[in-house]
Image: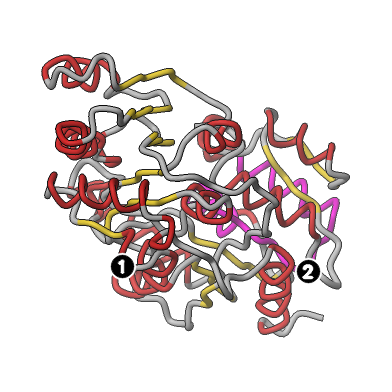
């Protein structure tokens, strides 16, 4: 996936739309994000901030930014930035966090129970310093409350998306996965489901777009299933043209919070098949949700979403980017900042 997906996409959308009543300054490490932010007219400070630069450098960089900008609110995203903010910001600015990446099963992100306990303790401690916490789905908020014993109510602000003008869709069985090739995405289960679909619909095609450590395992599984002519692994692709060239987006992850890929697919009229986990049921109808470990159910859902346009998801009532930014502004106001 692109370096501008996920949280970077969220920050770009917020910067493009603006938070009503607020001046926004983004502090980010050098890379693609600052470049794109400047292209949309955002105010950006590049600094050695983030896991690649280490905790000490990140804390020093944020302290310098706070000293120069003198913000009323410091809004951080993801675990490392949250911990940096808790350590770097003194009295005065309100601290707000948005959680994008928690999972119900801790081992999705931490490969040992010891690491899980350490990180849970760190999150519980740092949240005591924050004046407000935002979650991108109800499932995310519930997981935060359960794991980190949040003292304040977690505000749910889903990722906003704007309608797009897309050509009318036709039925078809060109299946697309846009995901890192890693275990938590359960791509072997998608291959098994696709194999069942291909047995009854030999014209079906599957694209596993992305890079990651599971690529050799997936290629071997494709060959073992005899799907070499029907499945491609092209590496990184540009999501927009890829979505235009496929009929169904498939995502059988162990957990998702509020997936932009699912939201974008639905706004473009694609069929969508996803595991019934995390925030997915808050986005998708039952016709799009499956048990990833049941290949026949996955195959049936892929066929239904590909061939029956009436079952495809719509996002009626879903917040726009402007709606999202207004809810963020309201969260800032709730902290008592002036």
Quarter of the image for residue 129 reads bottom right
The image position of residue 300, as x and y in percent, is: 21, 50
Q: Residue at x 84, y 37 (%)?
A: 39
Please name the residue that numbered disc 1 is placed on: 286
Q: Residue at x 26, y 50 (%)?
A: 254
Q: Residue at x 78, y 66 (%)?
A: 19
Q: Residue at x 71, y 48 (%)?
A: 12
| Secondary structure type for disc 1 | helix
Residue 51 locus on image (x, y percent): 51, 36
Residue 130 visible in the current orientation? no
Q: Is residue 198 above or below residue 12?
A: above
Mark 1, Cα crowd under 10 Å, few <14 / some 14-19 / many 20+, is: few
Drawn side of residue 219 relative to residue 322, left or right: left
Q: Is residue 16 visible?
A: yes
Q: Quadrant of the C terminus?
A: bottom right
| SS at badge 2 | loop
Q: Nearer the viewer, residue 317 or 117?
A: 317
Q: Which contiguous range is marked in magenta?
A: 58-86
Most prominent secondary structure in the magenta stretch? helix
Instruction: Count the labels in the image.
Output: 2
Left or right side of 260 for 234:
left
């Amino acid at each position: 996936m692109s370096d501008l997906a996920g949280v970077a996409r969220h920050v770009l959308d917020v910067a493009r739309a603006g938070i009503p009543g607020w001046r926004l300054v983004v502090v980010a490490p050098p890379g693609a994000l600052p470049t794109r932010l400047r292209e949309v007219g955002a105010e950006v400070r590049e600094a050695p901030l983030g896991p690649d630069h280490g905790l000490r450098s990140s804390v020093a960089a944020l302290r310098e930014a706070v000293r120069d900008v003198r913000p009323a609110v410091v809004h951080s995203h993801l675990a490392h930035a949250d911990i940096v903010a808790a350590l770097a910001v003194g009295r005065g600015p309100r601290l707000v966090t948005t959680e994008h990446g928690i999972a119900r099963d801790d081992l999705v992100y931490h490969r040992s129970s010891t690491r899980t306990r350490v990180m849970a303790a760190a999150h519980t401690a740092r949240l005591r310093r924050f004046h407000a916490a935002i979650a991108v789905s109800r499932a995310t908020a519930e997981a935060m409350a359960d794991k980190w014993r949040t003292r304040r109510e977690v505000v749910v602000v889903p990722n906003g998306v704007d309608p797009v003008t897309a050509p009318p869709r036709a039925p078809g069985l060109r299946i697309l996965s846009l995901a890192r090739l890693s275990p938590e995405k359960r791509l072997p289960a998608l291959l098994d489901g696709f194999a069942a679909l291909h047995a009854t619909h030999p014209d079906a095609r599957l694209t596993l777009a992305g890079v990651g450590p599971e690529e050799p395992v997936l290629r071997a599984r494709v060959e073992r299933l005899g799907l070499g002519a029907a499945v491609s692994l092209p590496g990184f692709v540009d999501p927009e043209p890829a979505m235009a060239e496929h009929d169904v987006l498939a995502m059988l992850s162990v957990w998702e919070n509020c997936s932009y890929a699912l939201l974008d697919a639905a706004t473009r009229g694609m069929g969508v098949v996803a595991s019934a986990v995390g925030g997915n049921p808050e986005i998708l109808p039952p016709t799009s949700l499956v048990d990833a470990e049941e290949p026949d159910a996955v195959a049936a859902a892929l066929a239904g979403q590909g061939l029956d346009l009436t079952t495809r998801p719509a996002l009626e009532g879903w917040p726009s980017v402007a709606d999202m930014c207004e809810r963020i502004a309201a969260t800032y106001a709730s902290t008592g900042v002036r």
